[in-house]
Every structure is written in structure tokens, then in C-alpha cells.
Image (cartoon, rainbow, N blue to C red):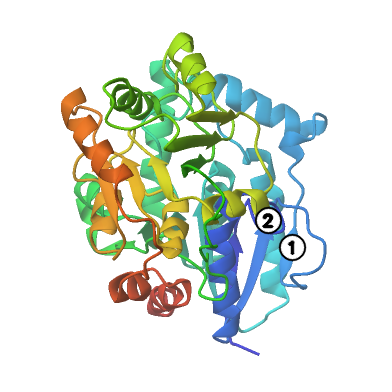
Amino acid sequence: MSDHLVILFAFHFPPENAVGGARPYRFFKYLNKHNYACHVITAAEQDGRLGDRVHYVPDEGQSGKGTGWQVERAVRKFIMPGVTGVAWSHAAAAKGSEIIRQHPGARVSLVSTYPPLGVLLASMRLSRMERVPWVADFRDPFPDKPSDKCEKPFHMWMHSRMERIVFRSATRIIANTDSAGLTWQTRYPKRRDHIHVIWNGFDPDNRAVAAPLPVDRPYRLYSHVGELYAGRTVAPLLESIGRLIGNGRIAPGEVRIQLTGAMKGPVLPPPDFTNRAIEAGWLELQTTPVPKKEAERIAATSNGLWLIQPQSAVQVPGKLYDYIQLGRPVLAFVPPSSPVERLLSTSGIEYRCMYPEMSPETMDTLMYEYLRLPCEARQPSADFEDRFNGERQTFTLERLLDGMH
């Protein structure tokens, strides 16, 4: 048995079908493969398939009853709107103490993978109780505005204060993009040497693989599968295609844009435009989520894939790593100089990036170029394979864990 016990707080975790569970699962899988004793504490209900090192702690804050639920409601209403896992954090930390007692003499390290807030509170509590080091891993940064309800100055102050407390308390901090890491190193110069970057990535044992394109499909299919919400708008891209069709540069029967997933807020063009596009046959909307297998099938059989991230200059959506493995052309709607564009530039696949502030003429030129790119699947570059392989990324985490002791 390993003498290095790692307790990983991951609110989301398989078998729950949540994007947030993929990164902690890779850490859990490869830490144990590399002879660490990694235990996970999660709010995701378990079915036993992942073994006895995954510990389910129910989230009382979501139960609708009990003291924990009342505490959670009060925190969300009066202190930090939009947060989750506050009540869960107490039970999770207690479970962590129990696991530590079961491993007398072991070196102990904690890892939290945020969001939500509960994993940070649990790790901070357990780190102080047991006097053990803690790595705070951020799949997403603390947002500048955590929810639409978080508008009062006190709420914003509390959110900023919590970020400062976490950054002072954690032994090491991990950002998942270079932009986020640089932002934090600038914001917290005294902690600069303790802030590291481990990008999101892919599991080499479970790669995304492109399927043959249907030979009887008379159009090229370009798809986006996933939620669209305020700030993550697809309207400028659809309007560009509308202009290309309107001036005869492409025919409506040549292409079809398929958008699958919940759509909240102003993410589409005006209704009259959207309805005309649907009637013309070049736009298809499915506004309810689909099972993971169906989402994978749509992506694997598309001629090209869309990534919509105009609202963030620091984050990379997890689906991009699957897109690159599929190898078909990617259209990314992102801010200039984003980590998405830097990643694509060395990926080895065909792509185009469009920026929110581009003129309609420039957008139309890039959209036309994108729609004319070859649709054959390309192999990702050696650089992509090296930097974003989940097992190799876990080696980086292991060096941080060992270095803390």
C-alpha cells in the first residue's frame, strides 16, 4: 500500500453525467495507477463500480429539508448568491478525517477541484483540522460575477474575500489555462511561485474517435452540442451564414447547422430570422439536452464542430479537447488572443477563429473559408498529445503533491 494518501474533494464525479467530473476522475484513476492511495469524496451518488476508494456524501443542502438545507438557503440569499455545497462541506470534511484515521502514518495531501464552493470549504476545514497540505485545483476561476442575483456590493465583496482567503490558505493552486494562471500570479504576487497550470485534457484510455460521414447525407453538417446562455451567443455566426446564403455565395441546401442543448437568454438571432432559417432547412434546433452517447454520436458524424466562448478570455471548454481528437474543422467564436485560439494553433487540425468585435464583412469572409475547409479527420499534433494527455498531466500533479512534503 502507498504511504502517500491523497484525498480528492470532487462534488461532481462519475457515474454522474457532468462535465465537471471528467478532470477529477482522470486524477483519481492515474494517481491510483501510479501507486498513490487516492480517495474521492463526492456528492455524486455511487453504484459501486468505482470501488471502495470513492465515498458518497449526500448534499443535505439540496435535500429540501433539515438544518443543512436551511443553512444553504440562508447563505445563498444573504451572503453569496449562487453558491452550492456549503452544508455538504462539513460532512465531507468529517469523512476526510475518518479516512485519515484509517491510514495511520501515511503522508496526507488534499486536493479540491472547484467548482462548487463546497469543495474549497471542505478542503480548507480539513487542512486546518489535520494540519495537512492542500492543492486547490480550479476547473473554472472564481467568476467576477458569480450569478445574476449577485449584484449587491456586499455580495461581491464576500465573493472577492472568499477568493483571497482560499488563495492565502491553499498550499498550492492550479489554474487550468495559462491566462488564468497569469491573472492570479499578477493579482497575488506573494503567491506567484505557488500558482501552477495544469490544462484540461483527455483520457488516453477513452479517446474521442471520428466516425465515417454518412455517404447519403446531401449537406455538410456543422454542430454544437451543449448549453447556450447569456453571453454565450451564437447569433453573429448564424447571421453570417444568412448573409452568405442571401448573396448567393452558398446555397441553403449545402449546409445545415445543428444546435443541440438548452438555450437560455438572448443566444439566437431575432425570432423572424431564426424561423426563416429553420424553414429554409439550414438551421436545426433541439433545445433539450441529449444523453452523452447521443452527443458523442452527433459530434463524431459532423463535418465540422462549433465552439462558442465569446464571454471568456481565460477559459477553454472541455469539449474542445474532444473536438481536436475528432480532427474535423473547428469554428471557434472567442475573444482575440484567447487560450482557445492558442491551443488550436498548435493542435494540427483545421480551424478558424471569429471574434465578437469583427465587422460583418470579415466574419463572412472567415465563415466562407471555414465552410470550404476539407472535412477529412486529421490526427492531432504531437504537441497536443504531449501537453493534454491526462496521464502525463497527472505526473505534474504528483510532483506538486510530493513537493509539499
Residues at discs 2 and 1 in contact (Cβ within 8 Å): yes
Residue at the extreme bottom of the image, as rendered: 1
Q: Using the rendered view, name the quadrant where residue 333 is placed.
A: top left
Is 376 on the left or on the right of 274, as rendered? left
Q: Amino acid at mark 2?
A: Thr
Across and down, in percent, residue 173 comes to 37, 58
**Up-down: is 112 above or below 224?**
below
Q: Earlier in the sequence, mark 2 or mark 1?
A: 2
**Up-down: is 394 above or below 323?**
below
Task: Please identify the quadrant where the C terminus is shown.
Answer: bottom left
Evaluate whether residue 403 shows in this view: yes
- 234 vs 228, nearest the viewer: 234
What SS does tag 2 mark? strand
Is 146 on the left or on the right of 356, as rendered? right
**Up-down: is 52 above or below 143?**
below
Across and down, in percent, residue 96 comes to 66, 63
Residue identifier under label 1: 55
| Rendered image: mark on residue 42 | 2
What SS does tag 1 mark? strand
Residue at image position (47%, 67%) is 133
Across and down, in percent, residue 257 comes to 47, 35
Q: Using the rendered view, name the quadrant where residue 211 is placed.
A: bottom right
- 378 vs 214, nearest the viewer: 214
Task: Please identify the quadrant where the N terminus is shown.
Answer: bottom right
Is 234 on the left or on the right of 62, as rendered? left
| Rendered image: mark on residue 352 | none
**Up-down: is 229 above or below 354?**
above
Q: Amino acid at mark 1?
A: His
Across and down, in percent, residue 28 comes to 59, 71
Residue at the extreme top of the image, as rendered: 272
Evaluate whether residue 184 shows in this view: no
